[in-house]
Structure formats: structure tokens, C-alpha cells
Amino acid sequence: MRRSKGFTLVELITVVVVLGVLAVTALPQFINFSSDAEKSRLKGLEASLKAALDITYSKAAVQGLESADSACLGGKFDETSVSCPDGGTLIFYGYPAAKESVLNQVVELSDWAVSEVGIGNVVGIAATEDDLMQCYVTYSAATSVSEPQIRVYADNC
């Protein structure tokens, strides 16, 4: 009698069907990974911004600038243009101003799309320009009555 080597057609079809069922049930989990990754990336940016704010405020407090409506850390302040022309960090009430150039001094934002909203009050930060209206972080400048606000909008990632 001959010994057969290999699998029968029925066995192969059964394996393909079982793998197909497993793929269909596991696919939704894999599709959601990119959304979860983007949300985690935004949460990481939020944590980085909060740490940078704490450090900046501490430096301002050491120099006695934490209550100044506008000043420069590490440079001369130009009252006419409300800027730090020699490279210092522009602060409002001890915290970084809501400007892309200022935030880039305290947090590395080269991999992010940044958009200034309004007149220096809010900065939107997202992974791409397209995400600036649906999956992003906002930074609102400090005022005389409130600390800066960092909000994550990750519902539409």
C-alpha cells in the first residue's frame, strides 16, 4: 500500500476557512491601533508641555518675573514689539507665550504642525495640517487671572 504525503484538499480548505474567521474577528483590533497611537502621542505632547511650563515658571519665579504681565527669560524685553529680540523666552505671568517660536524654545515641535489662533492667545498643535481641526492639542496663554490651559482633543483621531 502507498503512503500518501501531504494534506488533502478538505484539510487545506478547513485551514483557510479557520484562518479567515480569525482574521475577520481580529481585524477591528488592528484597525484601531493607529487611532490609539495618535491619542497616546497627543497625551505625550500634553505631558511635555506641562513639564516645560513648570520649568519655565520655576525659572521665572527665581528671577522674580512670575507676576509680570510680560517679560523675557534669558534676554532683554522689547516693550514696543512685546518680544525678546536677543533670543530670550517671552513669558506672560511666568509662563511661555502662546506663540510657535516661543513654544519651540521650551518643547521640540519640529515633528508637529503648529497653528497660532487669534492674536497670540492660543496655539493648536497636531500631527499634520489636516489634523489641526480634529485631533490636536491647544495651548492657551496665561492671563492675570488664570494659568495657561492645555487641552487635548482626541475624539476624532
Image (cartoon, grey):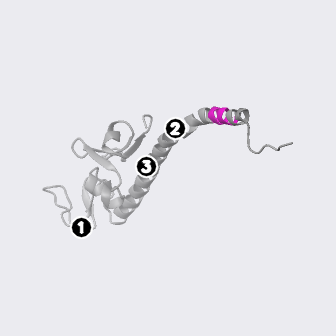
**In the image, residue 103 lies at what x, y percent?**
31, 55
Which residue was labeled with disc 3?
46
| Rendered image: mark on residue 58 | none
Magenta: main secondary structure = helix
State the residue lying farthest toward the right. Answer: 1
Q: N-terminal of the two: label 2 or label 3? A: 2
Residue at position x 32%, y 40% in the image = 130
What range is drawn magenta here? Answer: 15-22
The reply, left or right, for residue 101 in relation to residue 47 is left
Tag 3: amino acid:
Glu
Q: In the depicted view, which residue is nearer to us: 33 or 49?
A: 33
Q: N-terminal of the two: label 1 or label 3? A: 3
Q: In the depicted view, which residue is nearer to us: 58 or 132?
A: 132
Estimate how packed mark 1 is, as few (under 14), some (14 to 19) or many (20 or more) residues with alpha carbons within 10 Å.
Answer: some
**In the image, residue 27 lies at what x, y percent?**
57, 36
Gap in angstroms between the C-alphas marked 2 and 1: 49 Å
> In the image, is residue 128 part of the stretch drawn in magenta?
no
Viewer-nearest of labels 2 and 3? 2
Residue at position x 43%, y 55% in the image = 48
Gap in angstroms between the C-alphas marked 1 and 3: 27 Å
Tag 2: amino acid:
Ile
Gap in angstroms between the C-alphas marked 2 and 3: 24 Å
Which residue was labeled with disc 2?
31
Q: In the depicted view, which residue is nearer to us: 139 or 33?
A: 33
Q: Give the quarter of the image for residue 110.
A: bottom left
Name the secondary structure under disc 2.
helix
| Rendered image: mark on residue 75 | 1
